[in-house]
């Protein structure tokens, strides 16, 4: 099963992401961190110029591009042939990024709801697409956690997304249930316990739980001190068939997989 699991290393290009050790300040630091992650076994590296944590505020497309552009140039110069995903919900950012680095994976936390042109843009460029379930934005998501059945409701969301994707010609998309986005800790843990149910929709499943509140809060820890708990829950995700794991700690995660599989 491990051979079928893609490890996605996380690098944040901003100064307010929730886990400070994921941040880089310049292209040199980015290049060193990306090279280290690939060396540790990352299959893909995910980059994002804007925090999406609860309480965050989107700084606008112009600022997002200003932050992102230098790192894209570094990717083009130093990492030809390597796989990257770009965390953005702007179709214009996708077009500009494609012009610099060519094909990449679009990682859209809004599944196309923030930009009506996003799905068609990804489809037109032939880009793989990560569709994540979310509600609201950084300011409102924590107040939008009312579900009849969180797993069934999220599955319904993706059934509807699948229809939109098909109509737009988007064939290659990955399902991300959106751990930590408009869900309580209990709802996140329930989704993880029932993760295999999402595979019924016939799409590869991505899990992003690394060092999130659902991991550390029940244990009275903090993002900096919850690596062991993160690894245990990530391992459970793999055992339930997660095809992609978005992680901060590539070497530790890869080593832990070797102990359970």
Image: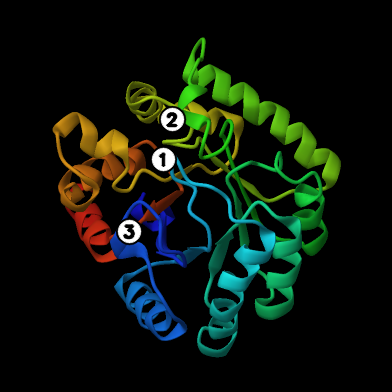
Give the residue drawn at x 21%, y 56%. 258
Q: CA distance from mark 3 to mark 2?
A: 23 Å
| Residue found at the far top of this picture | 148
Q: Secondary structure at mark 2?
A: helix
Would you name the residue on which mark 2 appears? 196
- Cβ–Cβ below 8 Å for labels 1 and 2? yes
Nearest the eye: 29 or 257:
29
| Residue linked to disc 1 | 241
Crowd rating for badge 3 (residues with CA inside 10 Å; few <14, some 14–19, many 20+): many
- Tag 3 and tag 2, C-beta contact below 8 Å: no
| Whether residue 150 is situated above or below residue 91 in the rendered picture | above
Q: Which residue is located at x 75 percent, y 57 percent?
A: 91
| Residue at disc 3, secondary structure | loop
Residue 170 seen in the current view: no
Gap in Å between the C-alphas at discs 1 and 3? Answer: 20 Å
Is 143 located above or below residue 171 in the figure?
above
Q: How many dots with numbers?
A: 3
Identify residue for label 3: 248
Residue 17 at least partly seen:
yes
């Amino acid at each position: 099963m491990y051979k079928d699991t893609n490890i996605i290393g996380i690098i944040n290009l901003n100064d307010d992401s929730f886990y400070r050790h994921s941040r880089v300040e310049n292209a040199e630091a980015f290049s060193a961190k990306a090279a280290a992650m690939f060396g540790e076994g990352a299959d893909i590296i995910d980059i994002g110029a804007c925090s999406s944590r609860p309480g965050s505020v989107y700084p606008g497309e112009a600022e997002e591009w200003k932050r992102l552009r230098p790192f894209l140039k570094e990717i083009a110069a130093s990492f030809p042939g390597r796989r990257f995903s770009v965390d953005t919900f702007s179709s214009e950012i996708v077009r500009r990024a494609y012009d610099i680095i060519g094909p990449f994976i679009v990682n859209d936390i809004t599944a196309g709801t923030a930009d009506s042109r996003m799905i068609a843009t990804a489809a037109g460029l032939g880009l793989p697409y990560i569709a994540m379930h979310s509600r609201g934005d950084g300011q409102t998501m924590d107040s939008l956690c009312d579900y009849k059945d969180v797993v069934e409701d999220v599955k319904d969301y993706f059934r509807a997304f699948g229809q939109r994707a098909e109509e737009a010609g988007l064939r290659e998309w990955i399902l991300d249930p959106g751990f930590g986005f408009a869900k309580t800790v209990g709802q996140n843990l329930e989704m993880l316990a029932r993760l295999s149910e999402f595979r019924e929709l016939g799409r590869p499943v991505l899990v992003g739980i690394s060092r999130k509140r659902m991991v550390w809060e029940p244990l009275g820890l903090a993002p900096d001190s919850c690596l062991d708990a993160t690894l245990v829950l990530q391992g459970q995700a793999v055992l339930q068939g997660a095809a992609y794991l978005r992680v901060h700690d590539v070497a530790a995660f890869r080593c832990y997989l070797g102990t359970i599989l």
